[in-house]
Amino acid sequence: VVTIRTTDEPGPVTINLSRRLQADVTAAGIFEHLRALQEIADRNRGTRAAGTPGYDDSAEYVAGRLREAGFDVTFDEFVFPAYSEETPPLLRTPRGERLRVGRDFVTLLYSPSGTASGSVTPVDFESSTSGCDNSDFVGFTGGIALVARGTCFYRDQAANAEAAGAAGLLIAQPSERGVIRGTLTTDAQASIPVLAVSDSVAAELSGSRARMEVNSTTRERTIANVIGETGSGADVLMVGGHLDSVLGGPGLNDNGSGVAT
């Protein structure tokens, strides 16, 4: 919640509005909207991610409820690079076993498409800056690079790995309940496939051969922010939440709860 002010001290209008809003937010009301967002996801392949029909339906739902409450609603359109995987990613062990997506490994958002196979070589693996500098790859001879989740951006690790001749990159992260999907960003200077793997998978693959595949696309799509405004005057109370979900789920914690509140 952000309060934007044009005077030094909150005016009575802002203070009263804030108190009324806080009093009106109830657990029952929040769950009503969460159920509605879940139903939208259920109708749209389990997701409300930006660039998907589930997002569009979510925007219409929020706009409708805002209008019912007396808000003036506008849609602020912008172009968004929507990322999607055309087929499930693949990671095979030296014995040819296919590891499980979501628990053992996951594709980083905006990972390029590609196939890589070869020896999995750890790169400065015990360091908190594993793969964050080109010098970490001195002596790397190709194949698949394995780095630990470190203090630099994933995109830096990917760019350094590719510059060193890696055909693919695995980024290990400690996890007990599955692997967290990170983001390379759309301007990552890398063209090799990148997967995040659990620390147990990293230990299994280190020094052995593996095969990995990513089949993805990034397309520009037009989506919209939903803006509801009411009232007038110099005192402005601004409340917001991001409407889209993560690709892997309906987004009720991230950030359906904010939308519902």
Image: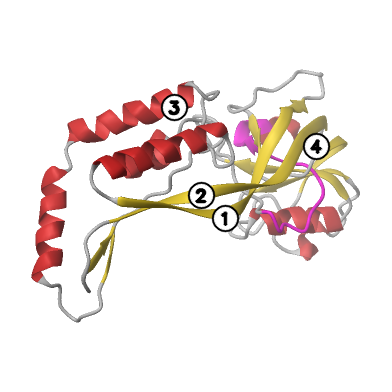
Q: Report the magenta residues as a range.
A: 186-201
Residue at which label 4 appears: 207
Vertical placement of residue 172 versus 250, above or below: below
Q: On screen, 84 above or below 163?
A: above
Q: Answer with left or right where residue 107 lies relative to residue 248.
A: right
Q: Are marks 4 and 1 in contact (CB under 8 Å)?
A: no
Q: Would you name the residue on which mark 2 appears?
A: 224
Q: Is residue 142 visible?
A: yes
Q: Which mark is residue 40?
A: 3
Disc 1/disc 3 C-alpha distance (Å)? 22 Å
- Counting every numbered tag in the picture gives 4
Circle nearer the N terminus (4, 2):
4
**Contact (Cβ within 8 Å) of mark 3 with mark 4:** no
- Sequence order check, earlier mark of 4 and 1: 1
In front here: 91 or 55?
Answer: 55
The residue identified by callout 1 is 78
